[in-house]
Image (cartoon, rainbow, N blue to C red):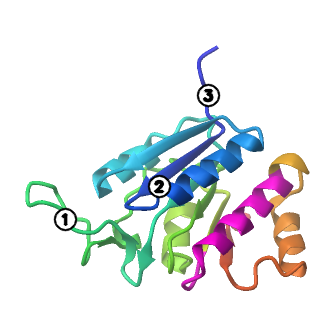
Amino acid sequence: MPYQPDATVIVIGDCSSEAQTLRLILENLGCKTDFSPAGNPIDFLTILNALPGSCRIVIICAHGDTNGLVFGEFSPEVDTGLLVHGSLPARNLHLAPASTNNRIILTTACETGTASFAKRFLDAGAEAFLAPVDFPDGEDVVLFIHALLYRILIRKQSLPRTWETLNDAGFNTGLMVLSRRTAA
């Protein structure tokens, strides 16, 4: 049977240490995991729009700012038309319909826990979108994601129950915001 990943970790910029840690956590929790560096916005969108059907968890490891996902500067031959001051804003996150279908999307990028980012992923079919609203410490986000994934993957708790449990235990303390699709 061909390899079918359960999860994908996408790394943008200089977040490879964080991304490798999250990849190892996913694998320790029993997930077959793809690791996908995205060198530019086109690569990033290509990865997102071609996720295999078996992939249920997507973690985007990146830096974020008020403009969006930070990609930085590129040489003149690289197309940066989607970027605003080196960052990819939600409005330029062009996702194919159903590209994130029934997936849990997490990002470690600061300030991406906005309604506009959530809407892009949820409109493309994501079950849920979790992201930092502010500028949390990176290690705190990694620990929170580990606790969240442990409860979902090992304890088999639903995402809403896991979210409540972690918030009640003080694990979240405003680190991340959860956005979910509303029932039709």
Relative to 94, 21 lies left or right: right
Q: What secondary structure prevails in the magenta region? A: helix
Of tags 2 and 1, which is closer to the observer?
2
Q: What stretch is highlighted in magenta?
A: 132-152
Residue 177 x, y percent position in the rendering: 66, 77
Q: Is mark 2 on a helix, strand or loop?
A: helix
Q: What element carries label 3?
A: loop
Vertical placement of residue 50 versus 18, above or below? above
Between 16 and 106, the one lying in front of the other is 16
Residue wearing tag 2: 16
Q: Do the residues labelled 3 and 2 touch (CB within 8 Å)?
A: no
Q: Quadrant of residue 32?
A: top right
Between 138 and 158, the one lying in front of the other is 138
Instruction: Identify the mark at residue 4; answer none if there is no mark.
Output: 3
Please name the amino acid that badge 3 sits on: Gln
Please name the amino acid that badge 2 sits on: Ser
Is residue 93 magenta-colored? no
Name of the residue lying farthest toward the front:
17
Residue 162 x, y percent position in the rendering: 85, 65
